[in-house]
Image (cartoon, grey):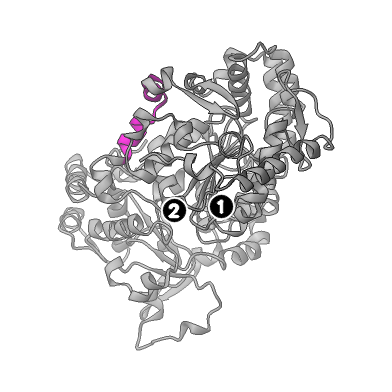
Amino acid sequence: MAPSFRLSSAPESADEATAHKEIYDQLPRVAETFPSAPSLIGLPCSRHPDGWYTFTNGVVSSMVIKEHLTARATDIFLTTFPKSGTTWLKVLLYSTLHRGTDELVAHSPHQLVPFLESQVFVNDRIPDLSSLSSPRLFMTHIPSQSLPNSVATSGCKVVYLCRDPKDCFVSLWHFWNRFMPWDIDEAHRQFCDGVSQFGPFWEHILGYWRWHVEKPNQVLFLTYEELAADTLGQLRRLAEFVGCPFTTEEQKHGVDRNIVEACALENMSGLEVNRSGTITIVDSTVPNNTFFRRGVVGDWRNHLTPEMARRIDEITKSKFKGSGLLLHPQFLQAGVCERHGHQEASDGAHHGRLHHHLPQVRHHMAQGAYVLCSPPRRPRASVPFLESQLFVNDRIPDLSSLPEPRLLTTHIPAQSLPDSIAASGSKVVYLCRDPKDCFVSLWHFWNRFVSWNIDVAVRQFCDGISHFGPFWEHVLGYWRWHVEMPSQVFFLTYEELAADTLGLLRRLAEFVGHPFTVEEQEAGVDRKIVEICAMESLSRLEVNLSGTTDFIEKDVPNNIFFRRGVVGDWRNYLTPEMAMKIDEIIEIKFEGTGLLFHPQLLREKGELK
């Protein structure tokens, strides 16, 4: 059923209505004392004491919200700068929480998830929202520094969606031109000067970005561009973040895919309610169709001159300098262009200087995850194995004296781990790999000790007879645990780690509760870790060239743990029939689990390019 603020927004008594009106009557006079601001599209505009602009009634509503809205730990706040994909984010999250899209046919997105500052706390209303059931889903454009203090202190979830500022500006300009003519040169000048609704744009984003860096478990920061590029993957990420992940059964039945299809711009804009319906914003009736235009990434090229685009890019670079935001792998890099997947430039460090940085790396890695899990022959950290280095040779070590967080690693399947791992809520990081590359790496490893015919090895691997195998059951055990408890189990693949090592390192750091700070990113701490931990760097260190490690009762040369690590290397060893056999088993074993549909797994059955 669609939520309604109509009942809760009606004052309970005449006295309450009078008191609310007095508050709203006083605040415009307070707003008159604020620094003056130029008009925005010809309408009165105020500059909030926290440094942002909007129409005067919006400033008043934000002050009422800050004073009278109390957040709960179970709340979800959707936050955006105007025209950053707000409508899309609303329907995606609403449909996810309700596990259906039926309401989209009868109600506009802004009826389902109203704006706090322009639909809920307006027209002398101070609604009582305490009667709404949890989780309450709220939407606002208010900058982070002006939200009620309880939003931060309650620990509620905040989802922030941002967008390439050039596309955002063009969308804003088109929107307001639906109501009154607005010269694009004048609009561009005001946008660049920071005079825009809830602007400046850059400070709005930086406020939420810094909050995300400090509290990654509370604030999810994502971009319109990555949402457009991988809507299904980002929807699953959103669902996990707000504590409502799609189950294996739901993925099998396409619940998440149906939501993506129903919420697509072309579908939403074609619904009758959005073609001919209206909603009330403050005290104006606004056609629903004004909230749907093109939504195309890079559409700014059709409207901005090269000089206009360059000006916005220059401001963006200047404003974000030192924030770490331009270095974020999921944000708009290379001058905030419309594609977010660019290769990041090297910081110029050379391998000859790596030893200087090793103490920093060790310090940061000591703050890592609790339990690292993988099938054999996944690249590993320099952390002893529980089953082959610690609990061996009649030893039962007392690990209670280790400082927290303790960093442990194991190949043990999920179902055979101590019960306390699941019960304690400790963090588990699971790394898996294309089974064909995994098999080839296993075969090479054991061939260092004993001759092993590859045909026999393939047959045994396919029969499930391998170290800690069967491979598929090992992967599925941790996958199902991740689906059930995504906040406890982080599931990633070697392939995505190889493709975006810096981005995945930052995600890992966030997951274990130790994100890289802005200062650390600016100083290149995360980049140095990536460089030092690269296969080519580690394999050349003297300790790995000539040293040994004790496994059970044997000294094993360290260099056997370093071979090639190349994605797709299986092509150099497996016949087409061997590869096909492994692919067929994977398809059968993973059918109905949702794993093959996971956007970060190998969807083309290992055929990576």
- Asked where in the image residue 599 lies, by quadrant, the reply is top left
With 517 as the anchor, is 480 left or right in this view? left
Q: Amino acid at mark 1?
A: Val
Q: Which residues are magenta?
A: 256-271
Q: Quadrant of the C terminus?
A: top left
What main secondary structure does the magenta stretch of the protein show? helix
Q: Position of residue 100 (x, y in %)?
A: 32, 39
Give the CA separation, mark 1 to mark 2: 41 Å
Q: Quadrant of the N terminus?
A: top left
Counting residues from the start of the chain, the first of labels 1 and 2 encountered is: 2
Question: Which residue is identified by label 1?
Answer: 530
Toward the viewer: 506 or 39? 39
With 311 as the anchor, is 261 left or right in this view? left
- Tell me the SS state at disc 1: helix
Of the two numbered discs 1 and 2 in the rendering, the one whose residue sits closer to the viewer: 2
Q: Position of residue 60 (x, y in %)?
A: 70, 38
